[in-house]
Amino acid sequence: MNLTGTIRNKVGSYVLRKSIKSQSRKVKACSIQEAKSIGLMYDATDLVSFEVVKDLVKQLSKKDNEIMVLGYVDSKQMIDHYLYRKGFEFFTRNHLNWYQKPQCDAVDTFINKEFDLLINLNLEETYPVKYILAMSKAKFKTGVFTEGQELLDLMIDIEKEKTAMKDLQAELAKDYSKASKHKTSYDTIADVKTNTELQLNFLINQLIHYLSLIKN
């Protein structure tokens, strides 16, 4: 990492620690059935993630609840497919300041909404995600387990699932190599998409399972 990157990370970490100390949030556990307002955040860089989250929104939507979705596109350009998606808001690298803090109306609205339940579907931890999780006024925050993570109230460990998926992919690769000697770039892209989809679906299923067990 170069000097600029090191300084950026140190400044970002300092701002985040200071922001967390200034937060006063009372945790209130909430089941998936009882949540009247739900915030979903995810990595929208790949279209396959959008399709998974769109299906989840349909599954969770009821007449008496409100669902707000915030996606981060790790690019300077917005994906055309995302334009004018009702109920979905997005931000890109263009909305990050020099130390990666997200700055846009969509993020501010999401942070200030006192969701009964916040579900973080980002599979990898990034500074923009950590900042939003830290500043969010949601009453109950859930998502994937990360070492040293103190921002979530309920976490799901998917590391074992990742190992199982890698073993499965290795077996499939062996079968594939027998059928074809050449693997194209399209096949590699398909593997990445399948891996992301499997991890997201596993995380979602586990979260819904445990959130359904909560008794208010």
Image: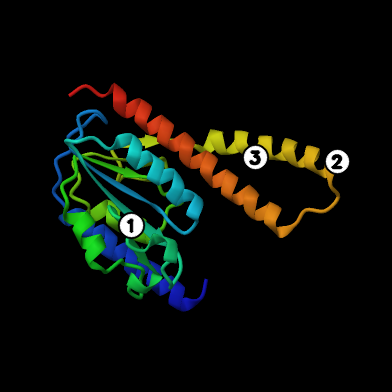
Q: Position of residue 50 (x, y in %)?
A: 43, 51
Residue 190: percent from the left, percent from the top? 63, 50
Front-most of residues 71 and 81: 81
Q: Position of residue 146 (x, y in %)?
A: 42, 44
Q: Earlier along the polypeptide chain: callout 1 or callout 3?
A: 1
Question: Is residue 96 among what the camera can see?
Answer: no
- Who's the residue at 43% across and 61% down the image? 81
The disc at residue 178 is 2
Q: Is residue 135 above or below residue 120?
A: below
Describe the element under mark 3 as helix, strand or loop: helix
> Who comes first in sequence, dot 3 or dot 2?
3
* Tag 2 near tag 1, CB within 8 Å: no
Tell me how far mark 1 sits from mark 3, CA to CA. Answer: 34 Å
Type of the residue with mark 1: Arg
Q: Is residue 97 above or below residue 181?
A: below
Colour basis: rainbow
- How far, Cα to Cα, is label 3 from label 2? 19 Å
Name the residue rendered at 35%, 61% in the picture: 128
Q: Is 16 placed left or right of 198 in the picture?
A: left
In the structure shown, which secondary structural element does the residue marked by tag 2 occupy? helix
Q: Quadrant of residue 168?
A: top right
**For residue 85, which numbered disc appears in the image?**
1
Residue 91, image quadrant: bottom left
**SS for tag 1?**
loop
Sequence-first disc among 2 and 1: 1
Q: Badge 3 is on which residue?
A: 166
Few, some or many residues within 10 Å of mark 2 (<14, 14–19, 20+):
few
Q: Nearer the viewer, residue 2 or 47?
A: 47
Q: Is residue 132 visible?
A: yes
Labels 2, 1: front one: 1
For image coordinates 21% across by 62% down, the residue present is 108
